[in-house]
Image (tube, coloured by chain):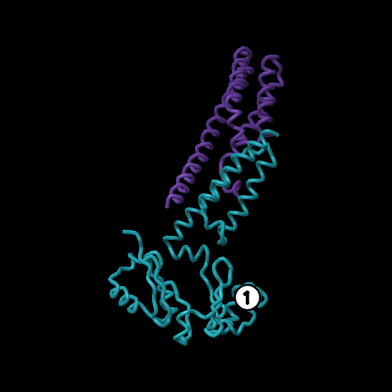
Chain colours: A purple, B cyan
Amino acid sequence: MKRIVISAVILAVMFVGCFYSVKVTCDFSDNLINRIHEVEDSYKNSDFERAKTCAQTLKDEWESFADRSILINDLGHAIEIASSIAEIQSFAEDEDDEIYASCDRAETQIDMFKDMQIPTIWKIL
Amino acid sequence: MAIVLIRAVILYIVITFSLRLMGKRQLGELQPSELVVTILISNIAAIPVEDSSVPMIMGIVPILTLVCLDVVMSGVMLKSAKIRKLMIGSPRIIISEGKILQSEMKRLRYSVDDLTEAMRSQQIFDVTQIQYAIVETNGKINFLLKNDYQPAEKQDINAGGSPKNPPSVIIRDGIRDSDQLKVINLGESWLTKILRENHLSERQIFLMTADKNGNYEIVESEKK
């Protein structure tokens, strides 16, 4: 009986943990995407200082999450996102128009990262 | 390299804990669901050890899920005979009263070779010696020899003995098995009479077996 209770508890904890991780990932991804939009908008409005600050914040936020993201993401995907975010920061500092392409690429990658965590019937199958 | 080593150690601990959670039954004969879980665990555990880019949690979560589900399902099966029958099936008689039930063997996809191999493994070389053969839910075949071919027991010295019938489990863990009562042709009223004679209710019985001659054995439950 003890085993059954322990098993039921472990199952419940894993169930809650897995769905909680989906929620955390979605919230965090949305936050990152908003941050990318901020960088893009600031750059579009020629507010380069604000674009630089937002790019730095974006990088810091990603780095704070990156270690934990390894738990749910494969290493290859995490490296791709990290390099795109690093590019945004670099282009913001150089005031290079390539920043738009970098922002789009990072947004797509983060969107995909978020999408990968959501259990839809098609992904389960 | 150190990561692989640490992962292997962690997975060893998780798998040992998991098998411990599955219980000692796991070390003996495997039921179909247990066999599936055991094979899957070995495959899933290999992935995060082989590929360090895959998060280890991706190995641990499915292993724990499978093991915990197996334990929870075994608990459910203890409570419900219907679910137990659905999940692991029920024993099947393939030789009854010395007669091979060919249709049953065909249904179970057992060949004559399977039968003779199982006989030989139990030191039986002549099919005419067998009174009953039962295929258990784990696929093992158990045999009951005809009276003349059974090893002599003390009680046989004075009594020639009437043909023996294998006893059936008619109450397990306080729950009556009406199907088995039908198999031994004794009926519900016989059971009610026996319970009354022994001043017991079904709930107070851990195990009760009976044969076609009405011989029975009762093991009372320790639960109060």
Q: Position of residue B71 (x, y in %)?
A: 49, 53
| Residue A62, visible in the rendered structure | yes
Corner quadrant of residue A117: top right
Residue identified by numbered label 1: B123
Residue B123's image quarter?
bottom right
Viewer-nearest residue: B28 or B66:
B28
Spot the residue most to the top: A49
Label 1 packing within 10 angstroms: few (<14), some (14-19), many (20+): few
Residue B77 is situated, as x and y percent measured from the top left of the image, at 46, 60
Please provide percent x and percent y for residue B105: 60, 77
> Which quadrant holds the C terminus of chain B?
bottom left
Which image quadrant is residue B177 in? bottom left
Q: Left or right? Give the position of A26 relative to A46.
A: left
Give the residue drawn at x 57%, y 62%: B29
Classify B158 as above or below B106.
Answer: below
Q: Is residue A33 visible?
A: no
Closer to the camera in the image, B196 or A118: B196
* Disc 1, SS: loop
Q: What amino acid type is highlighted by mark number 1?
A: Gln
Task: Tell me the quadrant of the picture where the N terminus of chain B can be found.
Answer: top right
In the rendered structure, the answer to whether residue B188 lies left or right of residue A111 reads left
Label 1 marks a residue whose chain is B
Q: Position of residue A105 (x, y in %)?
A: 68, 29
Q: In front here: B96 or B58?
A: B96
Q: Is residue A75 above or below residue B95?
A: above
Q: Nearer the viewer, residue A22 or A98?
A: A22
Label count reads: 1
